[in-house]
Amino acid sequence: MRAATSSSIASARRQRSGLSYRRVLLKLSGEALMPKGGNGIDPEVLKAIARQLKDVHALGCELAIVIGGGNIFRGVAGSAQGMDRASADYMGMLATVINSLALQDALESIGVMTRVMSAISMQQVAEPYIRRRATRHLEKGRAVIFAAGTGNPFFTTDTAASLRAVEIGANILLKATNVDGIYDKDPKKHRNAKRFTKLSYIECLNRHLKVMDSTAISLCMDNSLPILVFSLHASGNIKRAVMGEQIGTIVQ
């Protein structure tokens, strides 16, 4: 009875807040945490992201997060420098755990209860990833951060985000990036680059638009999971996304 009442309250809260998506998975790049001109984690950037996430969580949105590790180590880059690809990818997975713990700390310091679930067993710092436990955390109003990718080398954190989103029954995959959507070419290099407002999965794949890797897009396509690509740097954009405002580029 208590669980049913709690669920009813959460549902009513979502309706009052005007949420378009009940449960979302947000994909953040590790580079989003970097200080200007350096590597690692900028505490002020981390706090700013945490505040945005708190605003979304306060609306009653069930919030899951996957964060990359490129601010610390990228497996592909390590492989390009002569490292064994599998070893390099495992190092990249460990970098995502560091970022996940940092984000958990930032969220909990402002009152958002958070759980980090790792695809690689490290029980002293994170819970093991178990799908049913993850969905239960979300139902109880906790933010959940999925760390260590899929737990397998040769798969990106984009693919991990798509996989976890499908597993937990997310309504949409939100990809927050350094640009305000998907363009036909790099807008930083070409002034005449055209931004799309809507795309199909097939168009993304055929045009090689690089918004996510082909495995991630194909997984979303096979499971009819929409992808919204938008800028992280515009304050309040994550909230606008879950409210259903027209920002960025929708892939569906």
Image (cartoon, rainbow, N blue to C red):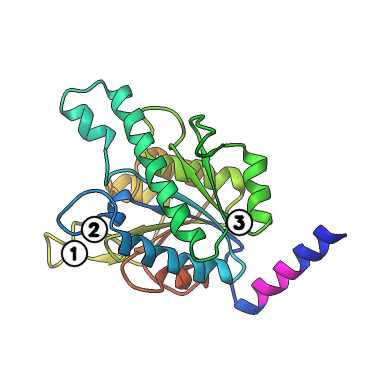
Left or right: 120 with respect to 178?
A: right
Q: Residue 125 placed where, x, y %?
A: 50, 38
Going 31% across and 64% down the picture, which residue do you hit? Answer: 44
Dot 1 falls on a residue whose secondary structure is: loop
N-term mark: 1 or 2? 2
Circle 1/circle 3 CB separation < 8 Å? no
Amino acid under disc 2: Asp
In the rendered image, which residue does mark 1 sit on?
193
In the rendered image, which residue does mark 3 sit on?
142
Query: In front: mark 1 or mark 3?
Result: 3
N-term mark: 2 or 3? 3
N-term mark: 1 or 3? 3
Q: Pointer 2: residues within 10 angstroms few (<14), some, or many (20+)? A: some
Q: Which residues are magenta?
A: 9-15
Using the numbered discs, state the Cα–Cα distance from disc 1 to disc 2 in whole angstroms.
6 Å
In the rendered image, which residue does mark 2 sit on?
184
